[in-house]
Amino acid sequence: MNRMTFLLTCSLVVSLAAATPAADTLQFDGWRPFSPRGQISPDFEIRREGGPQGRGGLVIAHDDREYLDGAWMKTLEVAGDCHYRITAYSRTTNVANARAHTFVELLFHDANGELVQDKQIGVKCRPFYPPQAKADHPGWAKFTGIYRAPAAATHATIKLHLRWEPRGQVEWADVSLVKSGPRRPRKVRLAAANYHPRNGKSARDNLIQLKPHIARAAELDADLVVLGECITSVGTALLAADVAEPVPGPSTEYLGRLAKEHGLYVVTSLHEREDHLIYNTAVLLSPEGNLVGKYRKVCLARDEYRRGTAPGQEFPVFDTDIGRIGMMICFDVHMPEVARGLAANGAEIIAMPIMGGHPTLARARAIENQIYLITSTYSINDDWMQSGVWDLGGEMLVRATEKDSVVVAEVDLSKQYFWRANMGEFKGRLRHERPAVRLPK
């Protein structure tokens, strides 16, 4: 590639900025350093035997100044209308927020560095940002994803970033861009129940009433069904302290048997007791009948904390054979931090038992976090929270319009979603573009 073509490639409108002066002298296997501006350029170093397998590493190091920004960049030839898998590894030192400040960028374009039309989104191509995947080398983070090159694309530019980390350092290594088949479908059937227990005298009475609704979800081939909030006390005269129990405990054991009998995941919320504390806790039961995990409601409603319920402190996400699942409960939807924390920790699906709330908030949480949200409530009113499944654009794929009903939607977790064309694949941007706030695991 001659210097003019290189400079054109670096001046793409999506901030592939002009190379720093160091780019004229420092190169490794086609990689060159760059920074948006020379005044904020970090230091660059080549480690010939770096990387997890000793095949070479590309280092970016920041001094103690704030908001330095730089990356290693390489441009390769590609074939249009073909899928490519990109993979890269990184290892950070003294980086406070790797989630926001180390990322990989991939952009398809023509030989002159000009953006090309992408029929997937109806506008010129936008950058892609491969997600972080499960590591396969200790101490190294792995980024990988499959993307289709637009038909008119002839080249792809990869950027390996470190930004805004005083005294931080990252080593990038083992970067590849290879032809691939398209993404494998990951279809999941998600169910929401709209059922309010009635006339129960005990927690077990209420749980027994759930049996036909779990069975109905199974009849609809659901992989996961979400039931309502505080299921062991709602519709009874019992208080939280009357029904609170350990988790795992009698109620999760009972629900686990139902989950195993019908071969699906079950989520609901109940009151948990641990020592002197009571929590509003969501539980996830597996098709094998096991307790996969629990989430303690972080944002308590007024009536809960007035009665002595304790808040949770964590945003756990659980790896399952249908995807990465997080849970939140009712009033959590009124605050953005809970869904944000779950999404930042890797949730693809969030299951939410909820008494009620404004449906616009559910839509907002789905959009801003690019997750599928399942809500199970006790209302069927148009202006109140509904039971159903919300997609990444904040639209309800299905909605329960009758009480005592179960609805199911099939989603494909592998499918790229372009919420708004000019934003590109919004989900990939969230990791590094949302505010760099440290969140609990």
Image (spheres, rainbow, N blue to C red):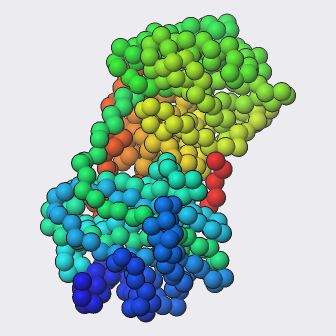
- Residue 213 x %, y %: 45, 14
Q: Is residue 416 above or below residue 378?
A: below
Q: Which quadrant of the figure has residue 186?
A: top left
Q: Residue at 66% of width from left, 37% of height from top?
A: 297
Left or right: where does residue 8 sit relative to residue 94?
A: left
Horizontal and vertical percent position of residue 97: 60, 64
312 or 9: nearer the viewer: 9
Q: Position of residue 150 (x, y in %)?
A: 19, 62
Quadrant (top left, top right, bottom left, bottom right) of the N terminus: bottom left
Residue shown at 24%/56% (left/top)?
Answer: 179
Q: Is residue 124 visible?
A: no
Q: Residue at x 64, y 58 (%)?
A: 438
The answer to whether residue 126 of the structure is visible from this angle is yes
Residue at 27 percent of width and 90 percent of height? 3
Which of these two is toward me, 281 or 286? 286
Q: Is residue 342 above or below residue 86?
A: above
- Locate residue 199, reporting x and y percent: 61, 7
